[in-house]
Image (tube, rainbow, N blue to C red):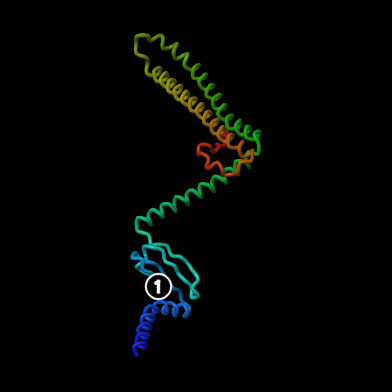
Amino acid sequence: MRGVQAWSAAGLVALGSAVPALAATAQAQAGGVIYTCTNAAGKKLTSDRRIPECNDREQRVLNSDGSLREVIAATMTADERTAADARARAADIERARQRDAVRADMSLVNRFPNEAAHNKARAAALDAVTSGLKASDLRLAKLARERKPLDDEAEFYIGKPLPLLLKSQIDANDAAVDAQRALVQNQKDEGIRINEVYDVQLERLRRLWAGAQAGSMGPMADAASAPSAKKR
């Protein structure tokens, strides 16, 4: 009798410990999925749905046959989500920059298949500056010729106030000369800028012509986009 009782007690203990497994098996046999994880206390948990106690850690989702269907990552905190979103945005921006760099390099090589083509484009861009400087020189020479009779007339009024008309003519001439000289300086600065742009391009093109992969040098500085030659 005592043997029967001992067997019954042992059977009940075994049955009790097997209940969760039997429940999971029944769920699996029903065609559902099983969620499993180990909580913070080290206890293994099993459920037919996501386990709230394990939201801060990885959960495994098993198919009805016990095979792994997926692994659910731990739920992020608000700060973690913000940081992850920032990293994702930064990665998207970097990928877009890389795509732009590839397209820019391919466009550059298509526009300038060799150094002769690039030199020709540089000369065309600088030609507009050269023409502008010549026009400014002619304008300054004309203003100088216009100024001479004004200065000659002003000599008659040394130590005396200039007539209003003469003074206004001299002031207008001064203003025109100052404006033209500022234009000359701007044109010279533009010539320097154009040369710097084409220098940067040429250095990059030489590497591309030598076989460098498009986009491998990263984005080219915005200032290195070649300007169109100005129309005269």
| Residue type pointed to by label 1 | Thr
Say whether residue 232 is visible: no
Image quadrant in which the N terminus is located: bottom left
At mark 1, the secondary structure is: strand
Where residue 70 appears, as percent x and y from the top left, is: 47, 67
Q: Nearer the viewer, residue 118 or 99?
A: 99
User: How far across and down, in percent of the image, does residue 76 sit?
Assistant: 37, 59
Vertical comparison of 56 with 105: above or below: below
Q: Residue at x 44, y 22 (%)?
A: 178
Residue at far front of view: 2
Q: How many marks?
A: 1
Residue 113 drawn at (x, y percent): 65, 39
- Camera-side residue of 197 and 84: 84
Q: Residue at x 45, y 11 (%)?
A: 152
Depth order, front residue of 19/131: 19
Which residue is at a point 49% across and 73% down the rendered structure image? 66
* Position of residue 146 in the picture relative to residue 127 (left or right): left
Which residue was labeled with disc 1?
46
